[in-house]
Image: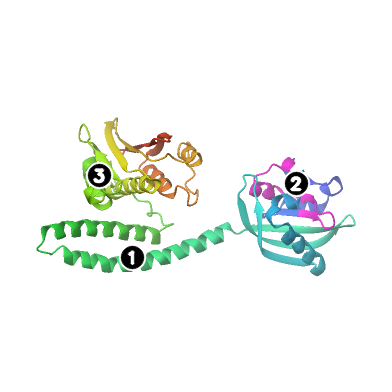
Amino acid sequence: MTLLMTTQLRDTAFATLFQGLYDPAFVVDAEGGSFIAANEAAARLLGYTMDDLATLSPSDIHPHEVPRLRAFLGEVMTHGRWRADDLSCRCRDGSYVPAEARATALQLDGQDCVLIQIRDLRPEILAEVGRSVRKLAHDLRNALTTSQLLADRLAGSDDAAVRKNANVIARSLDRALVMCQDTVNAGRSDSETVDRERFLLDDVIEEVAATMVMPSGLGTQIAFEPAEAVPLDADFDQVYRIFVNLLRNASEAGADLVRVDGRREEGCAVLMVEDNGPGLPAFIRDNLNREKPDLSSGSSGLGLMICCELAMRHGGEMKVARSDSTGTRFRITIPDAS
């Protein structure tokens, strides 16, 4: 079925116009509150088939705001037309689409109806979030620049330990500044550039340990005893971010030990990271192990989504090799440049 519509309306000029609308649209029985018609754009937006929509009513896609929906329909019938941007539609997968609804009262075959066109507000909301994040990143970059100048002063200290720590601080600030700049540049063609170089796994783990591991055995510790040197052809800072996120994720979950190992396979570095935490929630584990993980899964597992995205930028992947009550083991592949 290409168009949900009563038999009386299906062959009319209105039906042709209605089906040709670009935006999702519904015709609702003003008195009974049931769907009379829905176009294919509406089905695509909500993730239903046309046959599915034929069995639903507006309250099925607005179950969380039925009184508001009824008030909206009442305003349409009172004023002849009405607009609201405080409604949201529930999709078949359970997600909600914030929407602007524009409606007009009309009569079809003597029946009072409401024609509703829906505009998906998600692109505008995401654009506004993006603008806010870029402004924040810009201001944060300025603050980090000041900190970087202070770190440079410490690097000139006569104390060797102070100089060493100052260098670690300076490199961490450099990475933070780069991430801020990447955020400001988000959406540009070069915003996901991979700056490859040759380095050893030992080098990046040493840097992670210097910035993340507390002295005297406090906090989460790293165990790293590779059988052989493992060279990588990758973006050093992005690989560093993978390990930092995995270590932080393990620490926040209660792990006190993270084991790191690596080896070379054909044209590829294979990295194994294992913690002794309580294991991952099933939905995060299953998402990471999908062929194409959903990288927009919200705040839950955000650090792991970042790790997955960074590996994918290199043409590789990060998968969960094991996760249970004794801990989680990740397998990360970083292919060499082709």
User: Which residue is tagged 1?
Assistant: 141
Disc 2 marks which residue? Answer: 56
Q: Residue at x 31, y 41 (%)?
A: 257
Please indicate, yes or no, whether residue 254 appears anywhere in the rendered image: yes
Q: Return the residue nearer the eye: 320 or 139.
A: 320
Q: How many numbered discs?
A: 3
Type of amino acid at the residue the image marks with label 3? Ile
Please state the horizontal and vertical placement of residue 131, each as a whole percent of the image.
Answer: 47, 64
- Tag nearer the camera, 3 or 2: 3
Q: Is residue 332 left or right of residue 230?
A: right
Magenta segment includes 79? no
Viewport quadrant of the N terminus = top right
Task: Determine the image quadrant of residue 97.
Answer: bottom right
Q: Report helix, strand or loop for mark 1.
A: helix
Sooner in the amino-acid sequence: mark 3 or mark 1: 1
Magenta stretch, residue numbers: 27-52
Quadrant into which the C terminus falls: top left
The image position of residue 11, as x and y in percent, is 83, 47
Label 1 environment density (alpha carbons within 10 Å; few <14, some 14–19, many ≥20): many
Q: Is residue 337 visible?
A: no
* Res. 305 mark: none
Quarter of the rendering containing residue 7: top right
Residue of label 3: 205
